[in-house]
Amino acid sequence: MLKRTGTALSITAAALMVSTALSSAQDIAELEAAAKAEGMLTTIALPHDWCGYGDVIAGFKAKYPEITVNELNPDAGSQDELEAIKANKDNKGPQAPDVIDVGFAFGPAAKDEGLTQPYKVSTWDTIPDDAKDAEGHWYGDYYGVLSFAVNTDLVENVPQDWADLLKPEYANSVALAGDPRASNQAILAVQAAGLSTGAAAGEAAADAGLNYFAEMNKAGNFVPVIGKTGTLAQGATPIVINWDYNALTGRDTLAGNPPVEVVVPKSGVVAGVYVQAISAHAPHPNAAKLWMEYLYSDEGQLGWLKGYCHPIRFNDLVKNGKVPQDLLDKLPPAESYEKAVFPTLEQQESAKGVITSKWDSVVGANVQ
């Protein structure tokens, strides 16, 4: 039973307000009732053209028309989201975000600053352990993996793994989608190459990756240009190493002119994760929890996949036959993602330090 007292929502089922997990259909029904009574959900930094978010938000609205979705600053960055929570911690008005979607490093940072509250969605057990906070303060929602976007008008034999890129037939062909002295995507690509050699994530993979690109550069295969869809199409960089969701979107944009194949390598599959969290000061805590339940449901997860971002529950969805075949046909083979590695924050930071400081001396290629 629900009732309003002033602007605050009082729930006789008080346990619901502090519960960190749902265990039954009754719990879900109570949460839905509480969220509908609140009547609003405030999001931030969710551009509609990113990872299929436009359709995801529309899906939530269609399922819960009683809840108004108040969207703040779609183009904000992760740090902006944390600042919005801090700036509005005593404000229950429309400028206070209920939920955030941030880069991997910002989840633990938000928890450490006391900006999040724990909540475990009903599909919690299907989220990989290395992509979630054990207490439920933050949890991975979607990810991309490093892939090869290949212009097949110019490349006859499409490379299938990192070792292939060192072959003489790929002379003057391979580029990164960023400068490894500054770009997180490029830094992770170097680490991924190192992992493919059998090195452990972190400093070891960073050193091995630097040696790998030094060998590629010496062989004349590396092109020191930031690879993009345009350079791929023009032939300046016939092979670009970038996030699969960017590669797949670029493939669709080119629409066969030229034809592009996107390959997830057989080894060294590194995932870059974004995470969700609920504000510790959320004005609409139940709507926030219901939003999380929707995002981590099969429907919500498939919404991201339609935007070419792999939902965190991807392997579970595939195993249980929940992904439509026409959607799978647009993606690299599902088994390509089974070996995805989610480097820890410590591993990412240690690798970043090695790669950014040693790229010039070890590889010697001025990417620009």
Image: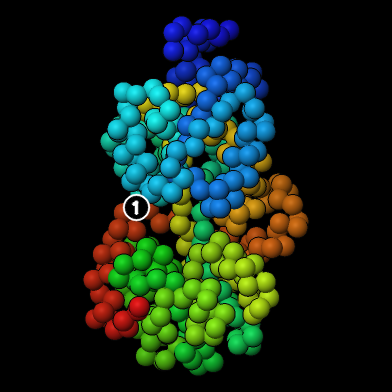
- Circle 1 crowding by C-alpha within 10 Å: few under 14, some 14–19, many from 20: some
Q: Is residue 129 visible in the rendered structure shown here?
A: no
Q: Is residue 177 above or below residue 303?
A: below
Q: Is residue 50 visible in the rendered structure shown here?
A: yes
The N terminus - image quarter = top right
Q: Is residue 27 above or below residue 184?
A: above
Q: Residue at x 49, y 45 (%)?
A: 46
Q: Residue at x 40, y 57 (%)?
A: 343
Percent of width and height locating residue 196:
46, 72
Judge from the rendering whether residue 215 lies leftward or rightward of residue 248; answer left or right.
left
Disc 1 residue type (three-letter): Leu
How many marks overall?
A: 1
Q: Residue at x 73, y 49 (%)?
A: 321
Judge from the rendering whether residue 339 lies leftward or rightward of residue 192; answer left or right.
right
Percent of width and height locating residue 159:
57, 80
Q: Is residue 61 above or below residue 153?
A: above
The C terminus - image quarter = bottom left
Quarter of the image for residue 188 reads bottom left
Residue that carries the numbered disc 1 in the rendered image: 345
Percent of width and height locating residue 90:
31, 23
